[in-house]
Amino acid sequence: KQEVTQIPAALSVPEGENLVLNCSFTDSAIYNLQWFRQDPGKGLTSLLLIQSSQREQTSGRLNASLDKSSGRSTLYIAASQPGDSATYLCAVRGYSTLTFGKGTMLLVSP
Amino acid sequence: ETGVTQTPRHLVMGMTNKKSLKCEQHLGHNAMYWYKQSAKKPLELMFVYSLEERVENNSVPSRFSPECPNSSHLFLHLHTLQPEDSALYLCASSQEEGSYEQYFGPGTRLTVT
């Protein structure tokens, strides 16, 4: 059974810092990995999707990497802003299901 | 209206009530999903529909009953729920069932009293 772990569970940084969120998964037989953002009490917003054949994806200040063989992905956020404050979820797509981590709660202070 | 919408956004119901959650997607997708998000737990997949046929049911209690009348609409019928069923229920859709990007609705915050 696939298990997804996200570290750290919570992170607080001052505005302007670059930061890295980590995601690890136990079964490397995946189709893709997706990073989401969730604001309090809201649904999920897809940030980046990396197919299993890809190594990284970039969107604006966000860069996600995937190392399938080691079961790891990182989400890099450059020049963080208070508006980046949210919970970031990592989800791994296997053959039949999408398995989520518990998320990293990010707070960026002005 | 675009994307994935869910109604109601908030729902409070007693354990003997019957209610329904509604999800609608305007993306022309063929697959739809129900997820449950409880406090301090990862999202849990409940049901998957592809072309209006249920393709997955992750051991969900029968007090949750999904319905997919067409590829744009998905319902979750609720009856005789328990307080531990209180959670955020999220609907998602994707182009096809499988390794496609999923788009999520805003969720329904359900409280069972």
Image (spheres, coloured by chain):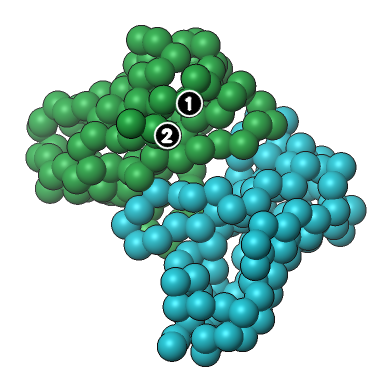
Chain colours: A cyan, B green
Residue where numbered disc 1 is placed: B27
Dot 2 alpha-carbon crowd within 10 angstroms: few under 14, some 14 to 19, many 20 or more: some
Give the x, y percent position of residue A92: 67, 46
Pick the residue in front: A58 or A53: A58
Give the x, y percent position of residue B83: 22, 47
Residue where numbered disc 2 is placed: B3
Position of residue B59 relative to residue A70, above or below, is above
Position of residue B51 relative to residue A1, above or below, is above
Pick the residue in front: B63 or B110: B110
- Pointer 2 indicates a residue of which chain? B
Name the residue at 55% across, 48% down: A46
Name the residue at 71% across, 37% down: A94
Give the x, y percent position of residue B44: 48, 43
Dot 1 alpha-carbon crowd within 10 angstroms: few under 14, some 14 to 19, many 20 or more: some
Secondary structure of residue under mark 1 = loop
Give the x, y percent position of residue A72: 78, 60
What kind of residue is marked 1? Leu
Q: Earlier in the sequence, mark 1 or mark 2?
A: 2
Report the side of B99 relative to B95 (left or right). right
Report the side of A103 relative to A75 (left or right). left
